[in-house]
C-alpha cells in the first residue's frame, strides 16, 4: 500500500527566502506525482504534474523534482511571497488507475 | 472555462438522515473522482468514474455510500443513513485520461 509522507508539517519563513518542501513515498512504481496548494476553506489548486518518466517540472517560481528510485519529490519555491502562504499537498498515482494517494501536507507561512 | 463545481458547499444533518452531494466536472472530462478528508487525516480516494462507469470504487467506506454518474456528466454521492464518522470534506475532481486532476472546492459535511 502506497504511503506518502510530507516533511515538514509546518514551515514559517520570511518573505524573499527560497524554500524546499519534501515528499516521500514508499512504493517507487508510480505513474505520476502531482503537487497542489490549498488555501484555507478552499479546494485544491494543481501546481505541477510530473510523469514517472520525467525528472522535474517548472512553473514560474516553482520547480518540482522527482527521484523515483529513492521515492522522493521536492517542491522548490523561489523568492517566497506572503501570497505563497497555504498548505502544499503531494499526491502520487501508483499505477492503480488514477487514484491519488495524498500526504498530509506542509502548512507554509511566509511573513512580510 | 468553468472549473469543477460542487453543491452544496456546506451541509449539516443529523445522524440517520440522508444527504446527496453533487459534482459537475470540467466539460469534456470523462474521468471523475470522489475523495474525502476527515479531520486530522489526509485526503483519501473514494472512487473513480470513466464516463458513466465505475472504474474503481475500492475506497468507498461501506454500503451506506452510493455514487452515480448517469449520462456520464455530473455525479452524485449519496450517504444513507449518515453516521457521525461521515463528517468531513468531500472533494470531487475531474481529468482527461492520464492527466492532472482538477479539484472542486469541496462540500463540508457535518453529521450531528
Image: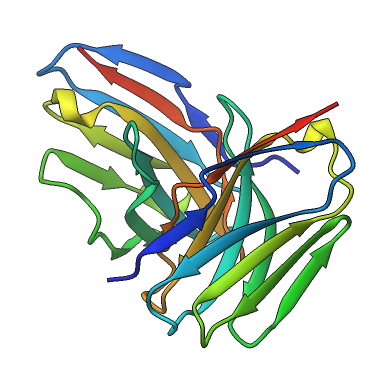
Residue lying at 30% horizontally and 18% vertically, measured from the top left: B110
| Residue B98 is at least partly visible in this image | no
Residue A49 is situated, as x and y percent measured from the top left of the image, at: 66, 66
In the picture, residue B22 is in which quadrant?
A: top left
Residue lying at 84% horizontally and 43% vertically, measured from the top left: A80
Residue lying at 46% horizontally and 44% vertically, measured from the top left: B92
Depth check, front residue: B89 or A80: A80
Left or right: where does residue A28 sit relative to residue A43?
Answer: left
Left or right: where does residue A63 sit relative to residue A51?
Answer: right
Q: Is residue B33 above or below residue A53?
A: above
Left or right: where does residue A103 sit relative to residue B36?
Answer: right
Depth check, front residue: A35 or B50: A35
Colour style of the rendered protein structure? rainbow
Left or right: where does residue A73 sit relative to residue A62?
Answer: left
Residue B53 is situated, as x and y percent measured from the top left of the image, at: 33, 63
Residue A8 is situated, as x and y percent measured from the top left of the image, at: 54, 49
Depth check, front residue: B111 or A108: A108
Residue lying at 41% horizontally and 75% vertically, measured from the top left: A94
Q: Quadrant of the C terminus of chain B?
A: top left
Q: Is residue A59 above or below residue B9?
A: below
Amino acid at each position: 500500500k502506497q504511503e506518502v509522507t510530507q516533511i515538514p508539517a509546518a514551515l514559517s519563513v520570511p518573505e524573499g527566502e527560497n524554500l524546499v518542501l519534501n515528499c516521500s513515498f514508499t512504493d517507487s512504481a508510480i505513474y505520476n506525482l502531482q503537487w497542489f496548494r490549498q488555501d484555507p476553506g478552499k479546494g485544491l489548486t494543481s501546481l505541477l504534474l510530473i510523469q514517472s518518466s520525467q525528472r522535474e517540472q517548472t512553473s514560474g517560481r516553482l520547480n518540482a523534482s522527482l527521484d523515483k528510485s529513492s521515492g522522493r519529490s521536492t517542491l522548490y519555491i523561489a523568492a517566497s511571497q506572503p501570497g505563497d502562504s497555504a498548505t502544499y499537498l503531494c499526491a502520487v498515482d501508483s499505477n492503480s488507475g488514477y487514484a491519488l494517494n495524498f500526504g498530509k501536507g506542509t502548512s507554509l507561512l511566509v511573513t512580510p | 472555462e468553468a472549473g469543477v463545481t460542487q453543491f452544496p458547499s456546506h451541509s449539516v444533518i443529523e445522524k440517520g438522515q440522508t444527504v446527496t452531494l453533487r459534482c459537475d466536472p470540467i466539460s469534456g472530462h470523462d474521468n471523475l473522482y470522489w475523495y474525502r478528508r476527515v479531520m486530522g487525516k489526509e485526503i483519501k480516494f473514494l472512487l473513480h468514474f470513466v464516463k458513466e462507469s465505475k472504474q474503481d470504487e475500492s475506497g468507498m467506506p461501506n454500503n451506506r455510500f452510493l455514487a452515480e454518474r448517469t449520462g456520464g456528466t455530473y455525479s452524485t454521492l449519496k450517504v444513507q443513513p449518515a453516521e457521525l464518522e461521515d463528517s468531513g470534506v468531500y472533494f470531487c475532481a475531474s481529468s482527461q485520461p492520464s492527466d492532472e486532476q482538477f479539484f472542486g472546492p469541496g462540500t463540508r459535511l457535518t453529521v450531528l
